[in-house]
Image (spheres, coloured by chain):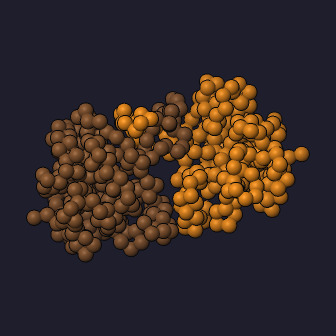
Chain colours: A brown, B orange
Amino acid sequence: MTAQLNARGDVAVLVPAAGAGVRLGPGGPKALRLLAGEPLLVHAVRRVAAAPSVRMIVVAAPAADVEAVSELLTPITPVSVVAGGAERQESVGRALAVVPADVPIVLVHDAARALTPPDLIESVASAVRAGRPAVIPTLPVVDTIKEASPEGLVLGTVDRSVLRSVQTPQGFQHQVLAAAHAAASDPLTDDAGLAEKAGIPVTCVLGSELALKITRPLDLVIAEALLAHGPF
Amino acid sequence: MTAQLNARGDVAVLVPAAGAGVRLGPGGPKALRLLAGEPLLVHAVRRVAAAPSVRMIVVAAPAADVEAVSELLTPITPVSVVAGGAERQESVGRALAVVPADVPIVLVHDAARALTPPDLIESVASAVRAGRPAVIPTLPVVDTIKEASPEGLVLGTVDRSVLRSVQTPQGFQHQVLAAAHAAASDPLTDDAGLAEKAGIPVTCVLGSELALKITRPLDLVIAEALLAHGPF
């Protein structure tokens, strides 16, 4: 049995949160770091659940914490929690394995992008629904970008007009993600990269400034301000 | 006569703030947008003035606003205000023209990077003092970066480990910046890019998350949070 949000929804959202530093308890787990008193994972899952197309959410937690993460999220929304693997890619694979074949669209989402608006989740899902096999939300690159040697000598200025900064959720036709993961050899943190390697066309949709990845201590200050600022 | 901050300082800092949308009065000028009740330019200049190596600050303002910008900044710190040009590069050139030849180090700084810590200004100046002809503060690129076609089709994943996101202040040996500007043909928004074109080696030093460019409305929310969070 898998926990359902909306029987009419056609989207499953996978949230890999089993990596190092994601353990419950003391020690500063990333996905469970508190933002305005609640773990990042809770913020992320709440927003995913608010997207009308989402039928199910599958969180990959550390094996030892499956029950605890389940208890954490159940008051928020129906969610399936599976034991993740050592690598992010393995966690995505295990979460994907519990998605029924009749769910046509699968998104993979970072818990650390805890303020991602439901609208962006809909926008990615909608592009997949319209026929794109793989879809990523991206933002233009704002700062000047240089290529530099490891010693910090500038090798050249990069044409940033062709660059896109990639966010999540990344969206896929179910069978495309399954095939890309089955074919993958090297572990990647970027699911669209797997699709690219498999020769699948990947399309960009406009991302959101609110979908920032909350990793550095300063990001928490920023995220709290964004959270206080408006209803997202 | 040029306004001096610290007669022992060996650094002049140029702040081009004459571009479109920088006019005083209503209409939302960028450099004069309010952050916690004060224009960005005031925040930026206050932090520049707090860097012990800085001998002088030269702001390039719109020709019609030289006096008003001078009145705005004089209560903060001694500062020279010159009439800027139509292009940023022209404004930098005009500001550079008033820097005495005996000031060996010249930095160019964005007013929109209003929270740049004095420490970063010192760090850039110090690398120039140590013999680097051109120095830029940079941060590693955190997000996955893709190259995409104008239509939004992903062309490939970029190796972000070689990329650096560029901030300001950018620092130069006085004569290097003068020569680079004299040789420049195309207008550039990136002074280090001029030095690169002139064949000058450009070196990276570690930038600061606080030196973010405040341009989008959301950036103001972020900047106010950073400002409220700690003493910078």
Q: Who's the residue at 26% across and 67% down the image? A: A24
Residue at screen point 49% across, 43% down: A141
Check the picture and name the quadrant holding the N terminus of chain B: top right
In terms of depth relative to the viewer, which is nearer, A47 or A154?
A: A47
Q: In this view, does A32 lie above or below B59?
A: below
Q: Position of residue A231 (x, y in %)?
A: 45, 69
Among the 4 quarters of the image, the one containing residue A52: bottom left
Rendering coords of residue A140 (x, y %): 47, 44
Left or right: A157 with respect to B97?
A: left
Residue that extends furthest to the bottom in the rendered view of this protein: A75
Residue B126 visible in image: no
Which residue is situated farthest in the right direction here?
A: B1
Q: Residue at x 52, y 45 (%)?
A: A142
Residue B21 drawn at (x, y percent): 69, 49
Q: Find residue B42 and report its horizontal and vertical position in percent.
A: 71, 58
In this rendering, the answer to whether A50 lies above or below B133 is below
Residue in view at x 74 percent, y 51 percent: B23
Q: Is residue A53 visible?
A: yes
Quadrant assignment for the C terminus of chain B:
bottom right
Q: In this view, does B96 lie to the left or right of B150?
A: right
